[in-house]
Image (cartoon, helix red, strand yellow):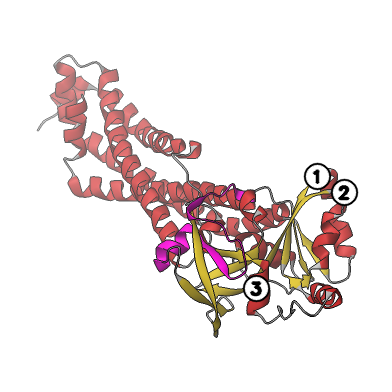
């Protein structure tokens, strides 16, 4: 039965190739949407890393979240360093991690922070050590691969993300490289907060200036953002409102802003999913027409099979099996093409130093693709199979040839 169905399937190669192409394109589009959506969500959840709130200068919460969590946008401004102490004194705050942004290295953002930032992602050092003093830097795994730098090398940062003027007089020393974590840390250059202040001319205190001068300098210093983790769920209800009430401060809840971002992206995925469904409907109709035509063209062959002892249900099963073979081949090609498209998207995002997709095996939703292909094939084959089942053998054999 299987060999006969396969021979029948390819007895009209052009028709079969067209049906296979339509089914494959439709299933590839569905696979791409399912897999890309799942991987984007996995990547967003990974980069959130338990961050409950981002505190920055007044402006757009979405911009603050994109700049502070995913490092995909410019920050809204700076906030006083004293804000960090103010947050740490709040009983609802379990942890507050400072970030100072503004410079980049070959398109990768340089981030002034503390060692606690690595703890948010459970990052481990791959080579060398963590920074211990200003102007020492630790490269993310992707930065190290792209630049070829290793511990002991030196580099100068550029102003802004677009590659502005070099700070040639301020050289960073690479002291370590992070192990590949698949998180946002892979595309960052991490250093001490004091390094950022020194590069931007804010580190002017001299050892002979005394305590008052140092105190005034600390008050004048700024950071860009603070990443906050709540001590209890009560923080989600009270802390953002308290932050927004402070002069010059704006809070952004990454969970809420990410949900908004996914709704915006969702419009595009719905269009692509709709395109895939249209292709599948067209493929189903094409298979239906092809099978109806095949039943008419093979009436003599089918009647001979009946005369040789094949029951009617086996004749109907032969038509259904032909459709299922086509659907199985299309499912394999569609899944392969969908995975290839997602791999291409991931490569494109990596080249643009944008959001990295989360690692994912075969997602649960992808198992729907073969089921969808099989269901569509059986639906298209139902009427042709019924026609084959109801063939009148006596009439066919008595018909003049």
Please state if 78 lies on the left or on the right of 397 as rendered.
right
Q: Quadrant of residue 3?
A: top left
Q: CA distance from mark 3 to mark 2?
A: 29 Å
> In percent of the image, x 18 and y 44: which residue is there?
12
Q: Which residue is mark 1?
A: 231
The region drawn magenta spans 120-149
Residue matched to label 3: 196
Q: Earlier in the sequence, mark 3 or mark 2?
A: 2
For residue 69: magenta?
no
Residue found 81% across the figure and 43% down from its top: 233
Name the residue carrying label 2: 91
Q: Position of residue 241 (x, y in %)?
A: 87, 58
The residue sitting at the front extreme is 208
Q: Residues within 10 Å of mark 2 (few under 14, many from 20)?
A: few
Residue 74 visible in the current orientation: no
The residue under the point 31% across, 45% down is 333
> Label 3 neighbourhood size at 10 Å, few (<14), some (14-19), many (20+)?
many
Helix, strand or loop at mark 1: loop
């Amino acid at each position: 039965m299987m060999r006969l169905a396969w021979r029948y399937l390819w007895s009209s190669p052009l028709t079969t190739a067209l049906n296979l192409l339509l089914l494959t394109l439709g299933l590839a589009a569905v696979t791409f949407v399912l897999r890309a959506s799942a991987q984007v969500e996995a990547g967003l959840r990974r980069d959130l890393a338990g961050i409950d709130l981002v505190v920055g200068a007044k402006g757009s919460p979405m911009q603050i979240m994109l700049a502070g969590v995913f490092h995909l946008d410019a920050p809204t401004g700076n906030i006083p360093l004293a804000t960090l102490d103010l947050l740490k004194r709040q009983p609802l705050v379990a942890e507050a991690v400072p970030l100072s942004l503004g410079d980049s290295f070959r398109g990768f953002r340089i981030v002034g922070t503390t060692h606690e930032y690595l703890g948010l992602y459970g990052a481990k050092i791959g080579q060398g050590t963590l920074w211990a003093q200003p102007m020492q830097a630790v490269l993310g795994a992707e930065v190290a691969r792209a630049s070829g730098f290793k511990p002991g090398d030196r580099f100068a940062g550029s102003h802004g993300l677009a590659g502005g003027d070099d700070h040639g007089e301020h050289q960073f020393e690479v002291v370590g490289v992070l192990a590949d974590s698949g998180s946002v840390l892979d595309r960052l250059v991490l250093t001490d907060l004091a390094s950022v202040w020194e590069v931007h001319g804010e580190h002017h205190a001299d050892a002979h200036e005394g305590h008052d001068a140092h105190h005034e300098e600390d008050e004048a210093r700024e950071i860009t953002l603070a990443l906050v983790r709540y001590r209890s769920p009560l923080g989600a209800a009270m802390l953002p409102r308290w932050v927004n009430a402070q002069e010059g401060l704006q809070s952004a809840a990454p969970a809420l802003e990410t949900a908004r971002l996914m709704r915006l992206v969702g419009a595009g995925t719905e269009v692509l999913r709709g395109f895939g469904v249209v292709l599948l409907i067209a493929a189903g109709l094409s298979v239906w027409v092809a099978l109806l035509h095949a039943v008419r063209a093979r009436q003599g062959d089918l009647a001979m099979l009946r005369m040789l002892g094949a029951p009617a249900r086996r004749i109907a099963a032969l038509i259904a099996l032909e459709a299922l073979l086509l659907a199985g081949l299309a499912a394999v090609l569609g899944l392969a093409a969908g995975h290839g498209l997602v791999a291409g998207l991931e490569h494109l995002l990596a080249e643009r130093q944008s959001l990295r997709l989360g690692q994912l095996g075969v997602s649960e939703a992808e198992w729907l693709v073969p089921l969808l292909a099989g269901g569509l094939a059986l639906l298209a084959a139902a009427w042709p199979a019924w026609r084959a089942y109801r063939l009148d053998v006596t009439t066919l054999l008595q018909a003049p040839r």
